[in-house]
Amino acid sequence: MIRHLTAVDGLVSAALGLDDPLGSGVKPLSPTERTETYWAAAYQPPTRAVREPWRDQGHTLVRTVSFAGRGVGEISVPYGGFALPLRDALLERAFECWVHGGDIAKAVDYPHEPPSAPHLHRLIDLAVRLLPATLAGRRRAGLAAPARGLVAAGSPGRSLHLEVEGKGGGDWYIALDSPAAVGSPDHAVARVALDGVEFCRLVAGHVPPVEAAAGQEGDREAINDVLTAAASLSRL
């Protein structure tokens, strides 16, 4: 897990002009491909020494961003097929650290609490913002139902109401047919209700889509597509 985090953090490092743990001149790779490349080249078997380079890398990232000045949050971080602004890349990094920290804590029977409610809300919001483009990608690959109601960019379109309960909760309206459309309560065709931590577990691939939602109503096809797209955001 720590080698995976190190490899993915290298995307942010490279975007900031810092050293990439995979070395210089590496061709663009997805996070999963980077992880597999790093695993293959690393010393085996892994020891506790893998933690120190990752901690140093993390401190350098935080220090660099802290002193980078205005506009640093807009720097583009490529993820192999898509890109995130740095402010979202750091949220994505926080999500991975929490989820994989929980994986490690579970393995050694150590307590591991979720983030505070405001922080959890931001992590949920990032995942929700990624869903329309993820749905579109799955549709192109034949993994989701065809679009039913394309609208002009920026216009409200067919939507799913995601009602997240508990810590970090809120209401989101996810555009179903195009990333360029705007989610709208007036155009909602389905509703899904689930707990905030459970939604994050779904996004992390820790919960099957069929078991995630506490409540569902409306267009079953849309519900299945959104829950499956959320689960597909997971890398490892």
Image (spheres, rainbow, N blue to C red):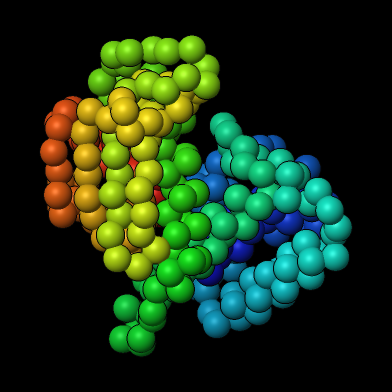
Q: Describe residue 1's horizontal placement relative to residue 191 as left or right.
A: right
Instruction: Find residue 110 and report its horizontal and vertical position in percent.
Output: 36, 87
* Side of 195 relative to 3 (left or right): left
Residue 87 in view here: yes
Q: From what the image shows, is residue 230 above or below residue 9?
A: above
Location of residue 95 in the rendering, given as x and y in whole percent from the top left corner: 49, 61
Relative horizontal placement of residue 230, taking residue 70 as reference (left or right): left
- The image position of residue 179, as x and y in percent, is 47, 26
In the displayed structure, does residue 57 sit left or right of residue 230? Answer: right
Would you say residue 1 is visible in this rendering? no
Residue 26: horizontal and vertical position, in percent? 72, 43
Q: Residue furthest front?
A: 186
Residue at position x 62%, y 38% in the image: 83
Q: Residue at x 47, y 19 (%)?
A: 155
Q: Which of the two residues, 11 or 227, is positioned nearer the viewer here?
A: 227
Query: Observer-nearest residue: 66 or 152?
Result: 152
- Residue lying at 43% horizontally and 69% vertically, measured from the top left: 117
Which residue does the image show at 68% across and 70% down from the upper left?
58
Looking at the picture, does residue 162 appear above or below residue 23?
above
Q: Quadrant of the C terminus?
A: bottom left
184 over 11 or under it: above or below: above
